[in-house]
Amino acid sequence: MFKIMQNPSYVKTNVSATVTVDSAAIQSADYLYDTEKLNLTFQNGSRYEYSNVPRFLFHGLQEAASKGRFINRYVLSSGFPYKKVA
C-alpha cells in the first residue's frame, strides 16, 4: 500500500531567487516560490510585486536571452495583479 505524503521532502518552501536584469528599465527580479510572487525593481528604484506568477514563468525568465523583453512580454502585459511596494 502506498502512503501519500502531505508535504513531500522535495518541495521547497520559503525559497526565493533573484535574477539580475540587463535592461534600461528593470534592475532585478526576485521570485518567492512559496507565495508565487515576483518582485521587480526598476532602475529608478521603484519596486512592484506581481501576484500569482507561476514558477514556470520565472524559470523562463532565468533562461531568457533578453530578460527585459521577456518581462515586458510575459509579465507586464499579462494582467497579473500587482502593487507598488517601494
Image: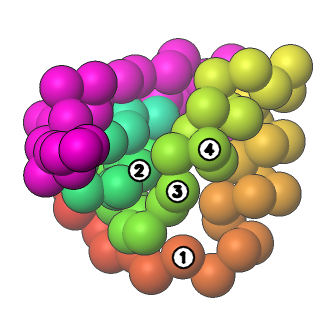
Q: Is residue 62 left or right of residue 48?
A: right
Mark 4 or 1, nearer chain start:
4
Residue 11 belongs to the span the image colors magenta:
yes
Residue type for callout 1 = Phe
Q: Are marks 2 and 3 in contact (CB under 8 Å)?
A: no
For the residues labelled 4 and 3, the Cα–Cα distance comes to 5 Å
Residue 6 belongs to the span the image colors magenta:
yes
Q: Is residue 14 visible?
A: yes
The dominant secondary structure in magenta is: loop
Mark 4 or 2, nearer chain start:
2
Residue type for callout 4 = Phe
Callout 4: few (<14), some (14-19), or many (20+) C-alpha neighbours within 10 Å?
few
The label nearer to you, 4 versus 2, is 4
Instruction: Pick out the residue farthest to the front.
Output: 1
Q: In the displayed structure, would residue 68 be above or below residue 23?
A: below
Q: Look at the numbered disc 2 and give the secondary structure of its residue.
A: strand
Q: Look at the numbered disc 3 and give the secondary structure of its residue.
A: loop
| Viewer-closest of 59 and 75 | 59
Give residue 20's position: percent from left, percent from top. Answer: 53, 18
* Magenta residues, start to end: 1-28
Q: Which residue is mark 3?
A: 54
Q: Which residue is mark 2?
A: 38
Q: Are marks 2 and 1 in contact (CB under 8 Å)?
A: yes
Q: Is residue 12 left or right of residue 75?
A: left
Q: Look at the numbered disc 4 and give the secondary structure of its residue.
A: helix
